[in-house]
Image (tube, rainbow, N blue to C red):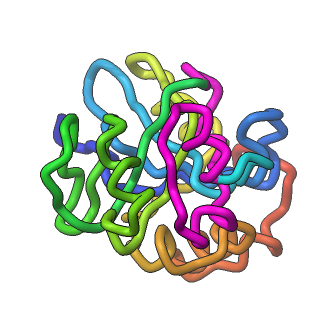
Amino acid sequence: MANSLKNHFLIAMPSLNDSFFYHSVVYLCDHDDEGAVGLIINRPTQIMLNELLEHINIDSDSEQIKTTPILFGGPVQKSQGMVLHDSIGKWDNSTQLADNIFLTTSTDILKDISIDNGPKHMLIALGYAGWTAGQLEQEIADNSWLTVAASGDVLFNTPSKQRWQAAASLLGIDINLLSDTVGHA
């Protein structure tokens, strides 16, 4: 696919009132002729990492995991865990998405995280967002999304509540100033 949006952010337009995607930022992990898959990166849940680890019987004494929220990655397979991270490791089921961005879907990375031996920067999500062939392209044409090349700084160094505005600022715009009225001239 010549115009793949893999390793891009989808930034929800203010007019997108979908309950799952309102003011969301999606990191696109894959985009090709068959569709797209991504993770919402700015929807922390009430579940903390220590609770998730306890649920899957992984012990940990790490203090960091008590304050690390799990993200709502999207409405598809909400029990599927995914770790978006910035360093290569020897974890099963890891895929390199960009120069310094990897996706791991196996629990061995969680075991390493539980003993402070995981990646330096990471986002952990349950579920993902998915689009069928042509669906995302139509939503973009309908003015539901802005797109911009992803930034590791926005992914890993920006608080989740600020990611929607920070991603839009990569385009040089203040998304709060955009009208939520759509139309075609």
Residue nearest the observer in this picture, 98 or 132:
98
Hey, which residue is sitting farthest left in the picture?
90
- Which quadrant of the rendered structure holds the N terminus? top left
Where is residue 144? Give x, y as percent.
66, 42
Q: Is residue 185 left or right of residue 54?
A: right
Residue 124 in magenta? no
Residue at point 50%, 48% (across, down)? 59
Image-quadrant location for residue 120: bottom left
**Image: 184 above or below 18:** below
Q: Is residue 37 left or right of residue 175?
A: left
Q: State the extent of the magenta-drawn residues as a range.
A: 49-78
Where is residue 134? Give x, y as percent.
42, 22
Residue 143 seen in the current view? no
Where is residue 57? Give x, y as percent.
52, 34
Residue nearest the observer in this picture, 119 or 86:
119
Residue 120 seen in the current view? yes
Residue 52 in magenta? yes
**Image: 115 above or below 70:** below
**Image: 88 above or below 70:** below
Image-quadrant location for residue 23: bottom right
**Image: 94 above or below 115:** above
Residue at point 82%, 34% (across, down)? 19
Q: Is residue 134 left or right of residue 96?
A: right
Where is residue 38? Give x, y as percent.
45, 39
Q: Is residue 127 left or right of residue 105?
A: right
Residue nearest the observer in this picture, 59 or 7:
59
Residue at point 74%, 68% (across, down)? 161
Residue at point 84%, 39% (across, down)? 17
